[in-house]
Amino acid sequence: MIITINQLISCSPLLILLSTAIVIMLFIAYNRNHAFTFLCSIIGLSFTLLSLYFVQKNIPTNVTILFHIDKYSLFYIAMIVLSSMISCVFAYSWLKNCPYDYEEFYLFLLFSTIGCISLIIANHMSVLFIGMELISLPMLGLIAYTYFKKHSLESAVKYMILSCTVSVLALFGIALIYSISGSLTFFSLMYELLMSMSHPNIVLLCGVGLVIVAFVFKLSIFPFHIWTPDVYNGTPSIVLIYLSTAAKIAVFSLFFKLFSFLTFFNIGFFNIALEIMLCCSIVFGHIMALFQTSIKRFLGYSSISQFGYLLVSLLNSSNFNFSLEVVGVYLISYWLSNIGIFGLMSMISNANCKLEFDCISCYRSLFWYNPVLSSIMTITLLSLSGIPITIGFISKFYLLSLIIKEHLWFLGMIFILGSMIGIYSYLKIITFLYLKPVTNSSVKKIILNTHSKKYVFFLFMISLLIVILGIFPDMVINVISRSEPRLFNIV
Amino acid sequence: MLLPIFIMVPFLGGILCLLCDQYSLKIAHYIALILMSIVFALSISLLFYDLTVYVPSIYGSHWNFEYETPWIPRFGITFHLAADGLSILMLVLTSILGIVSILCSWNKIKRNIGFFYLNLLWILSFSIGILLSVDLFLFFIFWEVMIFPAYFLIIFWGYKIDNKKTCLNRYIIANKFFMYSQCSGLILLFSILALVHCHYISTHILSFSYDALHNVHVNFFLETCIMLGFFLAFSIKIPIVPFHGWLPDFHTYSPISGSLDISGILLKTAVYALLRFNIFLFPHSSARFACYFMILGLITIFYTALIAFSQTDIKRLVAYSSISHSGFVLVAIYSASQIAYQGVIVQTISYALSTAALYCLIGQLFQRVHTRDMRKMGGLWSSIKWIPGFSLFFSVANLGIPGTGNFVGEFMILFGAFKNNILLVSIASFSLIISALYSLMMIQKIYFGVHSRSNDVVIMPYTSFREIFISVSLLVMLILIGLYPNIIMNISELPLNNLRSVFSNFILITRL
């Protein structure tokens, strides 16, 4: 097998991250130094970001049969690298409070990022499986990083068992596909589907179905959503910055590729199943979110419904260009608001020494002693609920126009219903921020130290960005439409 | 370039108020007042242009003033503002009410003055945006964004009594208002997108422009669905009876100036939108549904007028009476008569003025008596100067006494609609008796009758010049409109005729 220099450049994001991870590992073995590890991982991540510029020049290409890189995957890679960078920055001061070694945090993060990137550019079933495992195994370490905390181990074990079960199912599905097509590339799967279009092979479809179950589990769509709130509850907010954005975005990007292909062949069963799943997750996620008292559980449930909305983009009959735009805008808005809200939470719990501020009542009357923080939180929550002049609204607008374009009237009803319940549940939290402070001082007050001022500024910029992109969405739309949506090299 | 100024001046002025608040205590009042006066002067100056338009072809623009700049080219959305006589009249009304509400809250707001004026001016700015925008996306954005300042007004400066339950209620009511508005907004967005999509299918041009969208050819069923969506969204805001749940509660808990804004500005934008969009964009299906909507209007008139009787809170009473008047507007809009349409404008303006004056007076009364419960008042006529007299005048104006604008509006509506809907209008005219009854009952309970015990000791302070000025200026305007309604009608005739002529071609088929 010959690998040309162009191919090497094309997969340079992976290579840079791998070498960074190796350097960090070697350095940990030699001498532990927190600041160096932090710097090293930040530099590695920024070089990865930089390398995307060079990658951009010679794509789309195939790197061996395993990877396929096009402009659209670059867009997702950039988002993932940025979010792991941000979680590194937020983690730095948080880890200082930890009573034991903290270099491994960055290692876990880097490995998981490698998994995400390889999943995005995957063109082969083995990469799909390895990528998924590479995301979730380091994630276990991250979730259980504060194992001395109350729910930490519980959620890690829960995540591990469920995720392993699903991985096994996916592996079985891949085996079934292999038994029919005799090869593991996506191309052969498509070829096989194309050949048997009139009378589809049941074994093959079972295999595809099982792989889809794995995806749906990772995205926490309705019947497979049970892990999400519990895991969100036990995970430190800093890990959640990463978990809620990077992992889900990576999984979704590949899911979109595969599924859009399936609809291309008009396999009706998958469409119907998907429609039921997404309707249920929109309604169920929002309704359950209403009754939560912990803000992390709330966001867990709301992320279920958020991805329910996003799956609407898959129900497309003919032209996927518009869907790709929808997905791009939606993911950017989801990414920004999740970073905003979890960044805020992690900063607050970090400044208040080891107290996890995840109870909604902790944020009661935040406005009256810290208006800046409360306005950041209000903007991010409003963006999540999709209210005008935030980027969240633009993504909702895109989704609605897609629904109308495809004449999915029933789904439109579900959409409106879900949004109304959703707005109510977000509004409940926002109201808490503006309640008058109670006079007795039994409530924990949120105190910020001087160190967290920088983070406040950063979060303020993010919330400002949410608003600016909401008013001038042209910038986002241009970036996305310039990323040349092309799904597969063959289709 | 003139039109964006109307939106920008209050918008930036609000921010200026917030920034200047730290340096001086009272400066925000003056900034807000001066800026609104500028807007008022500008909107008056628009009236002095020649407002007749000669449309050279069907594709020519029929707006007097226009401003357009691209915004989101991906969806064919432009920042398109335009005004004709109708919008200018509403603009003048909005700026008058803006000035009144600023004067009204002059001494009452003690904390966070800058932030208060930010919210107040933003409500004005966004409602001006609603009145001027002719791009449906832009319209929708203003429609939705206007909720926030109103929401904050009620949360921070709402009805205050040191009582934990009232405090919590205020948040619940604010959320209720927010939810109702959001429902209305979502339905509106869905309908707008459906309409735009229909337009796209037939012409392959993606556009949200009002001028482009009124030529869409849609099948009847779909047009009906979209029209009902628009109607539902607007009727939540007007409000029409089954959807009116939020309004009285909102009035109960909002600050005086806030509720003045809501009644005068927010609700009037919905009437304007109904006139501007529902009838013009969907003449066919509107005509088919006209009689149902008129019956809905009739139910609104009687139901809320009867409910108003059982109120003990003055503000709720006035709120219900204003819902009752909006029923008249609905009847008039769907009667498709030229005279009734003129009446709608006269009535909208004069009712906005008279209810605004009533809310102001209630606020002034509340400052002196510290209650809004009518059962606790009585015999106040002799203990306060000026206010009882003004209250009497405005409540009598509110029930439509000849010589005031309200009479002209009501008369024209009933007269115009009578020709084709004899039964319906004759039933509707009986509601005037009910409204006379509850207005007089209100006056009687507050100002006449037995002195209640608690009021004996209260010494009423002197009525300030500012308070008299508000009442007198509104009074003069009402009488002016009542005696010479042509100042309104001359301006609104041409645009209203354009709207009506589209609609009346269809309505000839269906009559009650």
Image (cartoon, coloured by chain):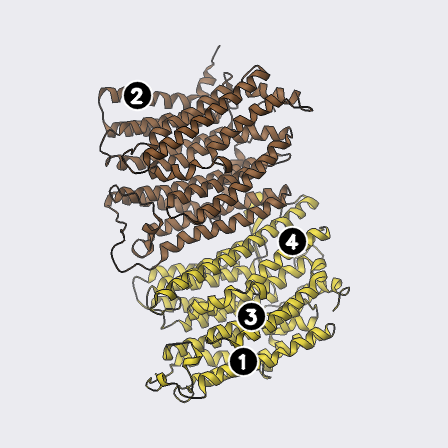
Q: How far apart are marks 2 and 4 (CA)?
A: 62 Å
Q: Is mark 4 on a helix, strand or loop?
A: helix
Circle 2/circle 4 CB separation < 8 Å: no
Instruction: Tell me the quarter of the image containing the C terminus of chain A.
Output: top right
Amino acid type for the residue under numbered disc 1: Tyr
Q: Position of residue A323 (x, y in %)?
A: 57, 37
Circle 1/circle 4 CB separation < 8 Å: no
Q: Is mark 3 on a helix, strand or loop?
A: helix
For disc 2, the marked residue is: A23
Circle 1/circle 3 CB separation < 8 Å: no
For disc 1, the marked residue is: B438
> Do tags 3 and 4 sit on the same chain?
yes
Left or right of A160, for residue A124? right
Q: Can residue B345 be seen in this view?
A: no
Which disc number belongs to residue B323? 3
Discs 1/3, front: 1
> Do tags 2 and 4 sit on the same chain?
no
Q: Where is residue A397 in the image (x, y as percent from the top left)?
A: 54, 46
Q: How crowded is mark 3: few (under 14 residues within 10 Å), some or many (20 or more)?
A: many
State the residue at coordinates (59%, 28%).
A261
Q: Distance between the residues labelled 2 and 1?
A: 84 Å
